[in-house]
Image (cartoon, rainbow, N blue to C red):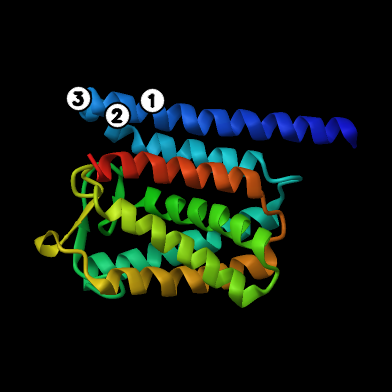
Amino acid sequence: MKILNQVNQHKLWISIFLVWLFHVSAIIGIQLGHEDWFLPLTPLNLLLCFGLVLWNIPQLNAKDLALMLVPFAFGMVAEWLGVNLGLIFGDYSYGNNLGPKIWGVPWMIGINWAILVFISASMAHKWTKNLFLGAAIGATLMVLLDIIIEQVAPYFDFWEFECNIVPLQNYIGWFVVSFLAHLIYQKFFHKHQFTLGVWMYLAFVVFFEVFAIS
């Protein structure tokens, strides 16, 4: 058991190092004017983060993978409704730096939803064991991050709202969809990784905030 705990700790800190290495490298590269090289690699960064999430789930099994499909599916369906019908989030469209799309929605956005629900649920679970309060905290953390990302999304060619105005509807929609995804996810997933969740969340905040204020 002691050896297993040591292995898990090594995996955790290797994962945190890689997350920050990728994000700090991207910050430096983009600031130096190499955004045409770094930004198209966004899908690779998301796959890395998702892979590290899975790597740090103890005794990963089919149930864990199935639960990861919950936020993935919620995100993809909600984004499809937004992009194609203007529902939930408002009128917007995706750019090219999130990779291949299906019906206007990049596959990577579903992976992004899975990552964000995992890290925000891990943080929320640390602070409360109440399902509804935990879902509300997790959804709030996701909305706060989205507020930062929205400021740079058009510049990064991630997505852009009509007239480049992000409506209040977007943030309400984010909270509602995130809350519902968290309810199901937190009800059945019990292998939360608080430390990884915090450091990954902070890496996302720092990365996008650097460009939001510059």
Alpha-carbon distance for marks 3 and 1?
13 Å
Nearer the observer: mark 3 or 2; the answer is 3
Q: Which residue type does callout 1 highlight?
A: Ser
Q: Horizontally, is 25 left or right of 185 in the view?
A: left
Question: Please, what secondary structure does the residue beneath circle 3 have?
Answer: loop
**Residue 38, numbered label:** 2
Residue 1 quadrant = top right
- Please say if 110 is above or below 195: below
- Please say if 136 is above or below 160: below
Q: Earlier in the sequence, mark 3 or mark 1?
A: 1
Q: Horizontally, is 71 left or right of 172 in the view?
A: right
Please tell me which residue is depicted at 67% across the width and 58% down the height of the picture.
126
Neighbours of disc 1 within 10 Å: few (<14), some (14-19), many (20+): few
Picture mark count: 3
The residue wearing badge 3 is 33
- Contact flag, marks 1 and 2 (Cβ < 8 Å): yes
- Please say if 20 is above or below 200: above
The residue wearing badge 1 is 25
Q: Position of residue 112 (x, y in %)?
A: 43, 51
Residue 28 quadrant = top left
Q: Which residue type does callout 3 highlight?
A: Gly
Q: Position of residue 144 (x, y in %)?
A: 40, 60
Neighbours of disc 2 within 10 Å: few (<14), some (14-19), many (20+): some
Q: Which residue type does callout 2 highlight?
A: Phe
